[in-house]
Image (cartoon, rainbow, N blue to C red):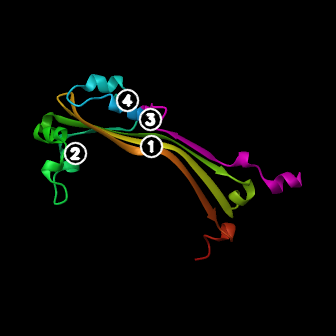
């Protein structure tokens, strides 16, 4: 019994799973977005491809003012540097709307021995998954611009060592 208590059990360590999208992978989300062709696709095509505002978590609807704040030309970015779809959206004023989708799947698993982790001496956290961000601009329900970014593969390990364990936070 004492041996079991001293060795610890990794199964007792916490795990966290976060799913903020209806897509199963980064590649699936990217492919769905790339099916939307500017000046050829509309809001219905966007919804058929998995970007329905009413059904997709973490979707932000953008007003014309939001789009202006993101793309207004500055000293570093000139008007001629902007995509024609962005310019058309800026010129369309209130007919311009945007949709930003942020999603992904993350898994955080603490690994190692229970007692050093529990007593705050040694913690190892492994984070895996992916994150995806998409931006779609529409004028009167016609898609005029789309872009994507993100992290196709997340694989991180965080190791925290505290030689004094639970006393580490007490001493300045």
Residue at coordinates 30% horizontally, 40% vertically from top-left? Answer: 147
Residue matched to label 2:
66
Compute the Cα span from label 2 to label 3: 28 Å
Decide which of tag 1 and tag 2 comes sooner along the chain: 2
Residue at coordinates 20% horizontally, 48% vertically from top-left? Answer: 71
Question: x, y (%) of residue 74?
Answer: 16, 57
Compute the Cα span from label 2 to label 4: 24 Å
Decide which of tag 4 and tag 1 comes sooner along the chain: 4
Question: x, y (%) of residue 42?
Answer: 24, 25
Residue matched to label 4:
32
Label 2, residues with CA under 10 Å away: few <14, some 14-19, many ≥20: few
Question: x, y (%) of residue 68?
Answer: 18, 47
**Secondary structure of the residue carrying numbered label 4:** helix
Mark 1 and mark 3 in contact (Cβ < 8 Å)?
no
Res 167 → quadrant: bottom right
Q: Is residue 93 left or right of residue 54?
A: left
The count of marks equals: 4
Tell me where the magenta segment starts and ends, as one range: 1-28
Is label 2 or label 4 in front? 4
**Secondary structure of the residue carrying numbered label 2:** helix
Q: Residue 131 shows which numbered tag?
A: 1
């Amino acid at each position: 019994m004492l041996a079991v208590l001293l060795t610890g059990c990794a199964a007792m360590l916490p795990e966290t799973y976060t799913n903020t999208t209806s897509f199963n992978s980064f590649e699936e989300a990217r492919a769905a977005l790339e099916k939307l062709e500017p000046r050829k696709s509309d809001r219905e095509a966007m919804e058929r491809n998995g970007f329905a505002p009413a059904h997709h978590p973490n979707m932000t609807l953008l007003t014309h003012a939001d789009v202006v704040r993101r793309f207004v030309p500055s000293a570093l970015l000139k008007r001629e540097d902007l995509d024609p779809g962005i310019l058309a959206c800026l010129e369309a004023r209130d007919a311009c709307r945007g949709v930003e989708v942020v999603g992904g799947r993350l898994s955080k698993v603490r690994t190692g021995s229970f007692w050093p982790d529990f007593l705050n001496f040694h913690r190892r956290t492994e984070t895996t998954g992916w994150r995806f961000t998409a931006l779609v601009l529409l004028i009167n329900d016609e898609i005029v611009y789309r872009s994507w970014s993100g992290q196709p593969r997340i694989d991180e390990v965080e190791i925290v060592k505290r030689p004094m364990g639970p006393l580490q936070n007490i001493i300045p």
